[in-house]
Amino acid sequence: MYIRATGNISPQKTFGHQPLQEAVAYTGNRLSCIEPDYKAFIDPKQIRRMSRIIRMGVAAAMECLQEAELKQPDAIVTGTAYGCLEDTHSFISKMVEFNEELLTPTAFIQSTHNTIGAQIGLLLQCNNYNNAFVHRGFSFESALLDGMMLLKDNDAANVLVGAIDEITNTSHTILSRLGLYKQGDTSNLNLYSSIPTGIGTKGTIAGEGASFFLLTNQPSGSDYAKLDGLHTFYKPDGIPEIEKQITGFLESQDISINDIDLIITGKNGDAGGDLAYDQLAQSIFADKESIHYKWLCGEYPTASAFALWLAATIIKSGELPPALRGSGSLDKKIGRILIYNHYLGIHHAVSLLSAC
Amino acid sequence: MDKLISDLKTQIIAQLNLQDTKPEDIGDDQPLFVEGLGLDSIDALELIVLLQQNYKIKLSNAEDGPKVFKTVKTMAEYITAYQAQNS
């Protein structure tokens, strides 16, 4: 299947199909999305009811459909782990404040995890298949898998697949207390360096994003890339099993690691979580060109959607974007990319893209 | 009454997140729903919450809704009457 179009709102300047010229630097442990002027994409009357994550998701989806020049997709599939946190926080706070006697209707209605897919459907007046997946670190992969199966079974000729997650003040505070993020001075630009943060320290940086893709079962001649396969595995029992799962996936695609031009990993600067990436770099990924992406978008359960967007744009252009050129020395056209990501060491996923 | 009408306009804009609308854009007798301000049924629920939250008024009879929420002025009149009755 093919990635015909994309739409991406992230902490980098990714909206509007811009190549990543220069990475946006952040100080602190939280990366926030750079948001566009929504009025160009969403009716102002409808914007007023939408919280930030809904606007981001809807705008990214609209940008994707505009690029594909498609008015109605055959299916809309979204993945989110946290859902609409701001709305959830809003109505729960009001309930507490008013002794459970008051419920703010809009925030309550918009707080469900399928809100963004529903809003896209409403805006498009699209009554086709519409589904939302909420599986923590597999949320995006589940949505992607559903989209791929719809195409494979010819239940749809094109599917709009996307992932959305936001970080709010409340969720950032709670997740910080749980030890997910680095403490003290830190920056996304030195996420992987040793001093004073990076390797050897606990935690990562918080991120968020909205990434959408239009997948089709027929090539258009101007697609970003071919999505060859996706494989997920849960709580692997050590590095040997991760290696086995990845090599098994490659074998199922009738290729070996030697056929991969570039590996994109989900390394996020957390000493514990990065062990897997570092050990693979010494074993099955040894001598392969690899880049990391979470210094650009931060860590969140559906961050792998940003990786898919990055991989698709790299394959379309055949080269690394300027912001990433320092991290690789590729001298040939990039035609095949393997993405390996894990979320908290629990949810592991590999996907394979190739040039059309 | 004028002060109450002015407060209500500000509260409605905040509660319904009416971006780009200023209190002076809302006429005292301008219909709030459909052809006027263009509010809908979800907004009606928000207005019920607004009354309860800011004026401790529980609209017990749903049939009163269209009458009470016709305009900002009718809302103000209802609040004033309620407060006079319960003071």
Image (cartoon, coloured by chain):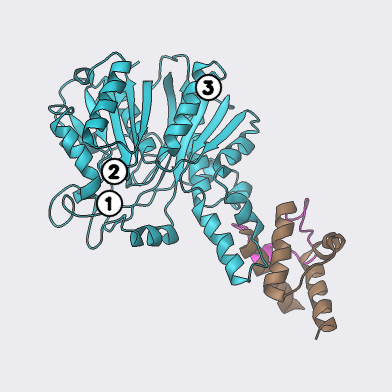
| Three-letter residue code for mark 2 | Lys
The nearer-to-camera label among 2 and 1 is 1
Label 3–label 1 contact, CB within 8 A? no
Label 2: state its secondary structure. Answer: helix
Residue A62, compared with residue A96, is above or below; it is: above
Q: Closer to the camera, A345 or A6?
A: A345
The disc label shown at residue A204, or none? 1
Q: Badge 3 is on which residue?
A: A150
Q: Badge 2 is on which residue?
A: A294
The residue range painted magenta reads B18-38
Residue A347, compared with residue A88, is above or below; it is: above
Check residue B23 for magenta coloring. yes
Check residue A243 for magenta coloring. no
Host chain of mark 3: A
Label 3–label 2 contact, CB within 8 A? no
Q: Please name the residue shown 42% across and 61% down the image.
A: A169
The Cα–Cα distance between marks 2 and 1, rounded to whole angstroms, is 9 Å
- State left or right for residue A176 relative to residue B26: left
Label 2–label 1 contact, CB within 8 A? yes
The Cα–Cα distance between marks 3 and 2, rounded to whole angstroms, is 30 Å
How many residues crowd mark 2 within 10 Å: few (<14), some (14–19), many (20+)? many
| Three-letter residue code for mark 3 | Leu
Q: In the figure, the cyan chain has which letter?
A: A
Q: Please name the residue shown 23% across and 21% down the image.
A: A260
Upstream in the sequence, badge 3 or badge 2?
3
| Three-letter residue code for mark 1 | Thr
